[in-house]
Amino acid sequence: MAAFKTLDDIEVANKRVLLRADLNVPMKDGRITDATRVERVASTIAELAAKKARVIVLSHFGRPKGRDTTLSLAPLAPALAAATGGQKVAFASDCIGPEAEKAVAALKPGEILLLENTRFHAGEEGNDPGFARALAALGDIYVNDAFSAAHRAHASTEGLAHLLPSAAGRLMQAELEALAKALESPARPVMAIVGGAKVSTKLAVLEHLIDKVEVLVIGGAMANTFLLALGASVGKSLVEPDLVGKARDVMVRAESKGCELALPSDAVIAAKLEANAPHETVRVTAVPDGWMILDVGPDTAAAIADRLAACQTLVWNGPLGAFETKPFDESTLAVARAAADLTREGRLVSVAGGGDTVAALGAAGVEDAFTYVSTAGGAFLEWMEGRELPGVAALKR
Ligand code: 3PG
Ligand code: MG
C-alpha cells in the first residue's frame, strides 16, 4: 500500500473536490511566460472533470501582502481552460466567503472553477484554523497536486488535509514516485550534481547527500569555495571565504563516509561575466589574479560524463557554470546531453529539479529525455536536504 491515497482510491463523482494546484507561474505584463506548471496539473483536472467531480481549483500566486490586483489568478482561468482542452473554467474573485460559496453552488458535475489567490488572506500563510475551515466548507474532498508548494505549511497546502478526506493528485503522485526512485530506493551507484552560486544555500543539501550517494559532483561558483579551501587561488571569482571551514568539513565527512567528492580540475575563466567575453581554459590551480572562473572546463565535463556512465541514477540541482551567458553554458550543456543519452539508452534514471536546472536542460534541448524533471524550486531543495515536506506529510495515511 502506498503511503498516500491517489485518485485511484477515491470516489469523486458529483463530489466537490478542492484541488490545490501550484499556478505560481512566471508572468510578465499579465502574460504567462512559462505555462509548464499549468500544463502539468491539467491532466489531474481533466481526469477529475471526466469522472464528474465538481472541480474547485485553489492556488497561491506571488507573495501578496493582502489583496493585490496585480497578483490576481484571473488570467490563469483561460490558461487552465486551454490546457484542459478547451473546457470552460469559471472564476470567483475570492477563495472563501459568499463570492466563493455562490460560485461553488453553481458548479455542475464535471465543471471547473478557479478561486482567487489564497494568499489574499493572511490565514493562508498563517495556516489559520478558521481560514482552513472556511476553505474546507467549500468541498467534500481535498486533492493536493502542488508538490512545488509542499514545503509550505499553509492552510491550502497542509491544513486542509486534516479537515477533509485527502489524496495526492497525479502530478504530486508522479513527483513523489520519481523522487523515491532517485534517493529513497535508487539503483546504485548514485551520482548527485550540485551546482549554483553559493555553498551557503546548499550546505544542508551537501550534508544530506554525503550519506545518500556514491558520487557527489560540485560545480558552479560554489565549487570555488571548495577550491579555496584546498589552497587554490581563485582570482576574483565569486567565492564565500567565510565558508571555507564548512567546505573543509564537507570534504572530511565525505571522505570518512566513502562518498567520492568530485571537484573541477579545469575551468573556463574570463576577466568579466559578459556574453562572449575573451576567455581561456586553465587548470583550477592556475587562475591568474583579475580573472574569474565562469564554468567548469571541458576535462571536468568529460570526467563527469565518464563517471556518470558507470552510475545508475543521477540527481541534479544547479548548473555547473554561468549557463545564462555564452559560452559559459558549455559544460552544463555537455553533461546534460550525456545524461540524456544514457537515459535514452535505458542505462540511467535521471531526475533534475530547480528553476535554473530546468532552464539549462531546456537550453540543451533534453528536458523530455530525462526520467523526471521537477518544476519545484524550494520544495525540491528541501527534499534534497532530506526534510519531510509538510504538504506531503499531511497526505500520508
Ligand atoms: C514556488 O514557486 O517555488 C512555489 O510556488 C512556492 O512559492 P513561494 O516560495 O512563494 O512559497
Ligand atoms: Mg520559491
Image: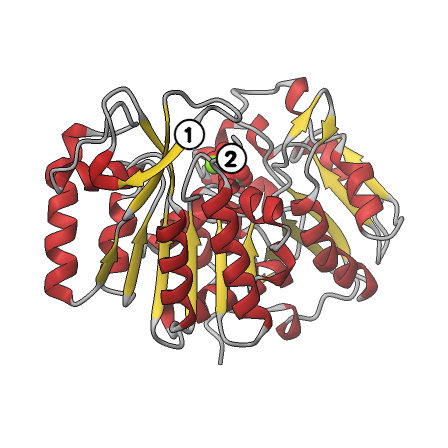
Residue 123 picture location, percent across and down: 49, 32
Residue 153 is at least partly visible in this image: no
Q: Nearer the viewer, residue 1 or 13?
A: 1
Q: Earlier in the sequence, mark 1 or mark 2?
A: 1
Q: Nearer the viewer, residue 396 or 165?
A: 396
Q: Which mark is residue 200?
A: none
**For the residue marked with disc 1, what is the amino acid?**
His
Residue 68 placement, left or right of 292: right
Q: Does the CB distance between marks 1 and 2 fall below 8 Å? A: yes
Displayed quadrant of residue 24:
top right
**For the residue marked with disc 2, what is the amino acid?**
Pro
**Colour mapping used in the image:** secondary structure
Reading the image, the residue beneath label 2 is 327
How many residues crowd mark 2 within 10 Å: few (<14), some (14–19), many (20+)?
some
Reading the image, the residue beneath label 1 is 279
For residue 139, above or below residue 130? below
Element carrying mark 1? strand
Residue 85 picture location, percent across and down: 86, 52
